[in-house]
Amino acid sequence: MNSSYERFAIVYDQLMQDIPYDQYVNWVKTNAPNEQYPRLLDIGCGTGTLSLFFHQEGYEVSGIDLSEDMLAVAYERLQTQGATIPLFTMSMDELEGFSNLDVVTIPIDSINYVVNQDAVIETLKRIYSSLRQGGQLFFDVHSLFKMDHIFMESPFTYDDGEITYLWYTEPGEFEHSIYHQMTFFLKEESGLFERFDEEHYQRTFAVDMYVNWLKEIGFTHVEVTADWSEDSPAEESERIFFRAIK
């Protein structure tokens, strides 16, 4: 993954327009209402869209992300909305400084950017340590089917007159991993287009591996659903959701 998201951060929100953030918020609110679970940490908060929604629902939100450029966009968004949310530059597998949290979220396949298996387990361990007893973890991942089949249907294209991209994928180094190569053309005020390139690498694991890790770490209850529904994962599910209680 590139060290700089500066240009990518500019176009990120537009490319995420199809994400049903309201469903994510409702999922958390239904299972961990802010009256009983006020303190929420949003891991991989990106440009702050979901953090702001949680704040508006009454949660006491903090956010971390590895990208300072993404956090700069988040800061501007929050300032515009008059929202005070502490933001920290931090890798999720090095999470520290948080305790007695009620809720932790890792939304929109952010944990898939942690490609080392030991680092994924370390992330879950550190989250467990940061939660209070009875606190809850919510996260989602790409399914094996999406990694191994849907992503292999590239190239993907997008063009809305302001942003154009060409998105190519190929199998990564590990099983169920993917290498993304994206070329963006961003329209400037002059009418000319600026080109920039992004490289991203993601990896996912089987559902039972995530469940086993969570239980081995000490989570007492693990619930698994798929594709923004209450249904259990099926063979061709694309996004898997996990809720775990400490």
Image (spheres, rainbow, N blue to C red):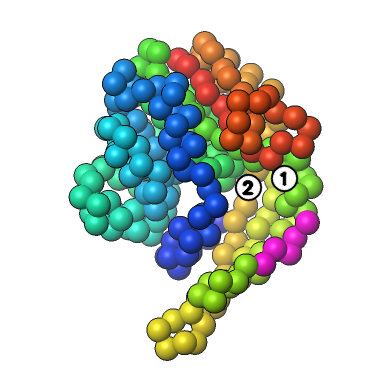
Query: The magenta stretch spans which residues?
Result: 153-157
Asked which quadrant contains residue 232, the reply is top right
Residue at 70 percent across and 63 percent down: it is 156
| Circle 1 Cα neighbour tier, 10 Å, few/some/many (<14 / 14–19 / ≥20) | many
Residue 68 visible in rendering = no
Residue behind mark 2: 202
Amino acid type indicated by mark 1: Met
Residue at 51 percent across and 44 percent down: it is 20
Give me the disc on residue 234: none
Amino acid type indicated by mark 2: Gln
Asked which quadrant contains residue 132, the reply is top left
Which quarter of the figure is the C terminus placed in?
Answer: top left
Q: Position of residue 104 (x, y in %)?
A: 41, 29
Which quarter of the figure is the N terminus placed in?
Answer: bottom right
Q: Are marks 2 and 1 in contact (CB under 8 Å)?
A: yes
Q: Position of residue 27 (x, y in %)?
A: 48, 29
| Label 2 SS | strand
Give me the disc on residue 147: 1
| Circle 2 Cα neighbour tier, 10 Å, few/some/many (<14 / 14–19 / ≥20) | many
